[in-house]
Image (cartoon, grey):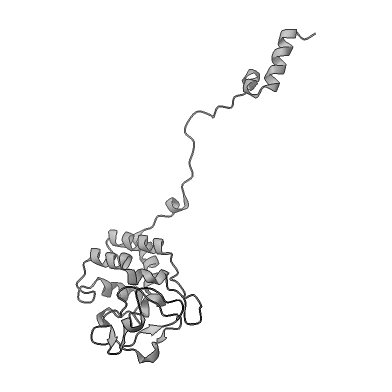
Amino acid sequence: MINRTYRVCLVACLVIPGLVVGLGYSKEPASGPVPTVPSASAQTELTPEKAFDLMMQVLTHKRCVNCHPSDDYPRQGEDSHIHNFEVQRGPENHGVAALQCQTCHQQENNNHSGVPGAPEWSLAPRKMAWQGLSRVEIAKSMLNPENNGGRTLAETVHHLTEHELVLWAWEPGVDANGTPREKPPVPKAEYIKAVKTWAAGGAPIPEE
């Protein structure tokens, strides 16, 4: 016959969760460090070379190249056709009289007319032409003070990551038909990180 005291204790241990230790079990975690799994970003290091590839996916996209033509005509649209109304560069990259950029392009997008807008809307100077260049040629031109307006590397990074007209590429609005314009293939935050990583790594330009 089971001892009455033992039977009471056994029942209590089975019924009351807090007493499961009486049966030799414990809810306490095992001692020692808990292993951690590195995040996806930690597993894939963004090297300056990889950063260059990401950055150039943006800089060679139509949202950038349309405003960096090799001639005196800005491009527009997803097919990069010559700007409507035969708009031209003009002496200061803002168009000619009566057809200056600010005549239509305001400080922000006009989603009623489909006209895009951002502060300081203009063409890049002819020396900064990217149309028809390889990504290596673009990078070399971008770092050349004779082509980039005398900018240092730090000033170039600032322009590429903070200038509102550059960042407009991720907020391009809609066209005249109400169709959203295509954005660059790299998210804005990743692009900015890529530019800064590339510059911090010495701004390497691969041989292609």
Q: Position of residue 194 (x, y in %)?
A: 36, 62
Q: Place residue 126 in its image quadrant.
A: bottom left
Picture coordinates of residue 134, whole percent (x, y): 35, 77
| Front position in the image: 42 or 125 | 125
Outermost right residue: 1
Asked whether the viewer can see residue 79, the reply is: yes
Q: Is residue 204 left or right of residue 21?
A: left
Quadrant of the image occupied by residue 101: bottom left
Residue 13: percent from left, percent from top: 68, 19
Please name the residue shown 75% across and 8% down the image: 4
State the quadrant of the C terminus.
bottom left
**Residue lying farthest to the bottom in this orientation:** 86
At a point 46% along the width and 49% down the height, the residue shown is 39
Instruction: Indicate the quadrant containing the N terminus: top left, top right, bottom left or bottom right.
Output: top right
| Residue at 32% over, 65% down | 161
State which quadrant residue 202 falls in. Answer: bottom left
In the rendered image, the residue lying farthest to the front is: 112
